[in-house]
Image (cartoon, coloured by chain):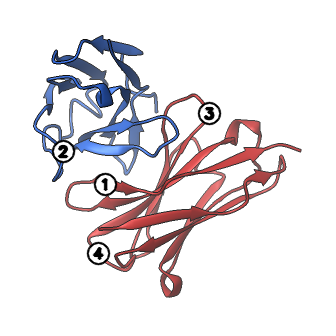
Amino acid sequence: QSALTQPPSASGSPGQSVTISCTGTSSDVGYYKYVSWYRQYPGKAPNLIIYEVAKRPSGVPDRFSGSKSGNTASLTVSGLQPDDEADYYCCSYAGSNNWVFGSGTKVTVL
Amino acid sequence: QGQLQESGPGLVKPSQTLSLTCTVSGGSISSGDYYWSWIRQPPGKGLEWIGYIYYSGSTYYSPSLKSRVSISLDMSNNQFSLKLKSVTAADTAVYYCGRGVVGTMTVDYWGQGTLVTVSS
């Protein structure tokens, strides 16, 4: 199972938006609604910010939004804030009780 | 809210078996609403799904690790465990346990993680 493809890095100035892509195949991202996104600070555990493509857990601000088109899912962080600087990972169900994570994207707030 | 805490040796010799336990508080591992996962992250690298177990005891493993991994439940102590045999340096990683929600098939709570180093 190959990792989902994410850009290694993305950046934006405070207040701007940044969008991170997560490209899989028609057997994972393209087929299932079970795509989630996690934010991870250095030395910390990942924290869920999006599930089922576009849903936000309680407490996650609406600055975070998710979408999917074909085999690519996307996470958009609007109104960038300094504490949005972190690593972001997507994750997709891949069928047959398997899961696959993305390669990760480091977001820098300029 | 669920809380999870990993525990186990931080150093394992090559060819031996890595054993970790995840203690769950704030919820019962016997609940049919959740599944219990293990995920790892080599230093400086991305996340890798290892496998998970349902309250029923059914287990599902990553194809790349299936021959070496086993996950089990300890209902009496509200814990679940990971065993990875025949480890090599490539198994050095931070190991996380997590709670998955059956309805959304999403791991929503993670333990803080524990670093396991494979070295002689």
| Few, some or many residues within 10 Å of mark 2 (<14, 14–19, 20+) | few
Any mark on residue A60, and which? 2
In the rendered image, residue A102, in percent from the top left (x then y), is placed at: 39, 29
Marks 4 and 3, Cα distance to the nearest angstrom?
Answer: 34 Å
Inspect the image, locate mark 1, and give the three-letter code of the amino acid beneath it: Asp
Q: Which residue is mark 1?
A: B108
Q: Identify the element where label 4 is drawn.
A: loop
Q: Mark 2 or 4, which is nearer the eye? A: 2
Marks 4 and 1, Cα distance to the nearest angstrom?
Answer: 15 Å
Q: Same chain for marks 2 and 4?
A: no
Name the tint of chain A in the rendering.
blue
Q: Which residue is mark 3?
A: B43
Q: Which residue is mark 4?
A: B32
**Pointer 2 indicates a residue of which chain?**
A
In the image, is residue B20 above or below residue A6? below
Q: Residue furthest right?
A: B120
Q: Identify the element where label 1 is drawn.
A: strand
Q: Mark 3 or 2, which is nearer the eye? A: 2
Disc 4, disc 1: CB below 8 Å?
A: no
